Amino acid sequence: DGGITQSPKYLFRKEGQNVTLSCEQNLNHDAMYWYRQDPGQGLRLIYYSQIVNDFQKGDIAEGYSVSREKKESFPLTVTSAQKNPTAFYLCASSLERNEKLFFGSGTQLSVL
Amino acid sequence: GESVGLHLPTLSVQEGDNSIINCAYSNSASDYFIWYKQESGKGPQFIIDIRSNMDKRQGQRVTVLLNKTVKHLSLQIAATQPGDSAVYFCAEYSDTGRRALTFGSGTRLQVQP
């Protein structure tokens, strides 16, 4: 079954801790994205990558970091510099940058 | 700046009626538009898309209309069913600037039985 897998589904972060959200796709898509969604809000772009070993900041990149070492994987690290990390995080991919996005099922991050 | 917005945050319709969800966009350079459906606690699902060289596109029970003159996008759902209850987002893409989809804030569709 082709698709995008995000893990874990739920994640808890302690103060001062970095946490990493996993995103894997087997769709052979070049572009991958991370969005943040707050309750009752739309999706805001954190980072995106259009090709391996390259990525760009989105609208709210501060306090986050990413890597794109493999085509299939685009992990997101929420660092301790992100003071309000509680949100629903969505990973997506597309064949090319101007094509429809396919989304994963999301990770709910909460602060302990 | 670039933005995508929706006119109505919540839309309540009777089962079997047609639904119309509207979206305004401000970037005249946007050339690709998508509608997504999101159920609670899940990732958005693709519904239908349209490119700027078209003004109408139909899918199964859904139609998207694009009016580039007034920068307006709409999603029409025919014979709305309880399973259509969800939040609907429009998104736009421009090949200038950021080169990634920009999402609106969403409209919640409630279908009354």
Image (tube, helix red, strand yellow):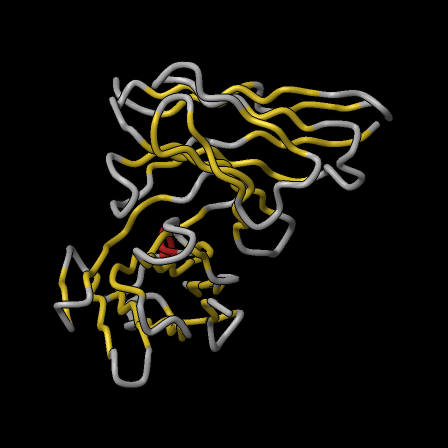
Residue A28 is situated, as x and y percent measured from the top left of the image, at 25, 22
- Counting labels gives 0
Q: Nearer the viewer, residue B72 or B85?
A: B72
Task: Tell me which residue sits at (21%, 61%) in the image.
Answer: B62
Q: Nearer the viewer, residue B42 or A77?
A: A77
- Side of B77 relative to A8 (left or right): left
Vertical position of residue B28 compared to residue B113: above or below:
below
- Side of A112 relative to A56 (left or right): right
Task: Tell me which residue sits at (74%, 32%) in the image.
Answer: A110
- Residue with the most extreme bottom position: B70
Residue B4 is situated, as x and y percent measured from the top left of the image, at 45, 67
- Side of A40 relative to B91 (left or right): right
Residue A75 is situated, as x and y percent measured from the top left of the image, at 52, 21
Task: Tell me which residue sits at (24%, 34%) in the image.
Answer: A95
Q: Quadrant of residue A68?
A: top left
Q: Quadrant of residue A94?
A: top left
- Side of B64 relative to A71 (left or right): left
Name the quadrant of the C terminus of chain B: bottom left
Task: Tell me which residue sits at (14%, 64%) in the image.
Answer: B57
Q: Nearer the viewer, residue A65 or B73?
A: A65
Residue B65 is situated, as x and y percent measured from the top left of the image, at 22, 72
Q: Nearer the viewer, residue B75 or B14?
A: B75
Vertical position of residue B39 compared to residue B59: above or below:
above
Vertical position of residue B111 compared to residue A84: above or below:
below
